[in-house]
Amino acid sequence: MNETIIKKMQEILGEAWVVTDLEKVKSYCEDQTEKAMKPKVCTDCVVVKPSTTEEISEIMKYANENKLTVIARGGGTSISGAAVAIMPSIIISMERMNNIIEVDETSLTVECEAGVTLLQLVELFNKHDNLYFPIHPGDEGAQVGGLVVMNAGGVRAVRYGVMRDQIKELEVVLPSGEVIKLGKNLIKNNAGLDLKNLIIGSEGILGIVTKATLSIKPKDKHIGSLVSSFDNESDAVKAVTEIFKAGIKPLAIEYMEKEAILKASNDIGLTWPSNDGAVDLYFIVSERKEDDLYEMYETIVGICEGNNALNSFVAESSKDQRTLLDIRSHVYPSIHDEVVDAIDAAIPIKNLSKYMENIAKISVKYNVEISTIGHIGDGNLHNSILTNGAVKPNNYEAIADEIFSLVIECEGSITGEHGIGKVRNKKMNLQFSEAELHLMREIKKVFDPNNILNPGTAL
Ligand SMILES: Cc1cc2nc3c(=O)[nH]c(=O)nc-3n(C[C@H](O)[C@H](O)[C@H](O)COP(=O)(O)OP(=O)(O)OC[C@H]3O[C@@H](n4cnc5c(N)ncnc54)[C@H](O)[C@@H]3O)c2cc1C
């Protein structure tokens, strides 16, 4: 990295907060994207660690004047290559901007700096009797800024929606260095175009989020989990449809192939409650009153049995609930070394059976293992293409093309939560018309005329 740039960064931040040591820099140039999908990493970068919005503004002004590439860096947990440096870049690590500013129990909000991690939020609200932050994607190292711009989802979207549904206000530094404040903590606000919603899900290409005010929820006192096993995915999907029709909103409904869940439980030495059948539904439910929780269990079990569930297991003790969650959380890590690509399509519930049946056909046609787990309650499934050692098969492109065409045929989206990043750009034209893509590119130009902010991402 050019010495003049390093000197300027040291002038803005002080020497201690400018990292040039190659080994240290390398760890900031990559994210958690599967190795077969990861774009070629460039390590000719400098990592800077600002602690204020003003410092970020100074860095952006300089970068914009000199047309230098900048990448905002959160927890580096992206699995779509969004945080990977592919050209010489100034990487702005948000790790020092990790202050929780205020929990407002009247407005039910938490205001925090963008470098606050999900783990910090979890720990903060573990100490609270009656409040919590509902979004929980798998990796607690993710930061608020990353959650905002990736519009993170996770398991509890069934009841609470995704990150977009929690964001009240944002502070953002534009590529020009200007600082803007977007959104208001109001239910009704119809003034102007909704710039806040443009930043949410923008994958870090429009501006750098420095602060966010997020909504928090009252905790339900009674929480439980339930597992039902089925012989096939079609019965499981029918059960989910009927559960929604019955007006039931669990916190989460997860879908897991039996082979994957048993492998995960075996790997971590815990016992999954059922060896029967080919697929499981795993529900997390919560209610304010105990009686309501029991009624919910009964209704869910009744519906599952009515759709040929082989058995159902209710986990009431916190130990049993923890065991189920630990095993579920380990499903992806337990197959990770074989994952070539984890496709994370979102499919409308009415087309889920058709989607799954055709995924099975694609697996047979190409003689490739495709493991399916996911957040079935919101139609977001993770179809992982698996090979020994995660080596990309020669026919990978044909397999992926067929899966993505199927996603579109099923009226779905090519990504439910992982984002386009730097791995799905070529598939954008499957989902969007040229007119829509043109609008997106023009919006990027308005925010970032010199294309300095994380180029090659999202579009
Ligand atoms: C094991 C595992 C499980 C996961 N499960 C889920 C899941 O269930 N649901 C889900 O949605 N995701 C999931 N993810 C993906 C990932 O956690 C999310 O995409 C997360 O939102 C990324 O946050 P981050 O802070 O790590 O961002 P990074 O990976 O550091 O960055 C991602 C993108 O955000 C940009 N960015 C980061 N911070 C800022 C900022 N302050 N301002 C502007 N741009 C910024 C970066 O430039 C980059 O483009 C999972 C990841 C892993 C590894």
Image (tube, rainbow, N blue to C red):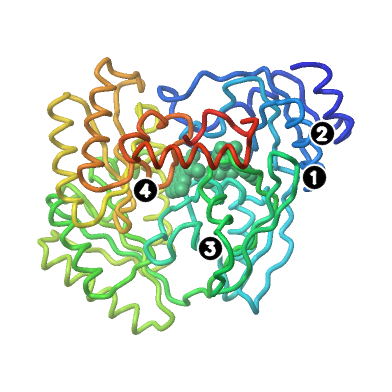
Assess whether mark 3 and mark 2 are in contact (beta carbons under 8 angstroms). Answer: no
Disc 2/disc 3 C-alpha distance (Å): 32 Å
Q: Position of residue 256 (x, y in %)?
A: 27, 48
Amino acid on which disc 3 is placed:
Gln
Whichever of callouts 2 and 3 sits on the residue coming sooner in the sequence is 2
Position of 200 compared to 11: left or right? left
Packing grade of label 4 (10 A; few <14, some 14-19, many >=20) is some
Name the residue beneath numbered marker 2: 17
Q: In which quarter of the image is residue 177?
A: top right
Pick the residue in front: 358 or 122: 358
Whichever of callouts 1 and 3 sits on the residue coming sooner in the sequence is 1
Point out the frontmost of discs 2 and 4: 2
Name the residue beneath numbered marker 3: 166
Whichever of callouts 3 and 4 sits on the residue coming sooner in the sequence is 3
Position of 385 compared to 116: left or right? left
Name the residue beneath numbered marker 4: 270
| SS at mark 3 in the image | helix
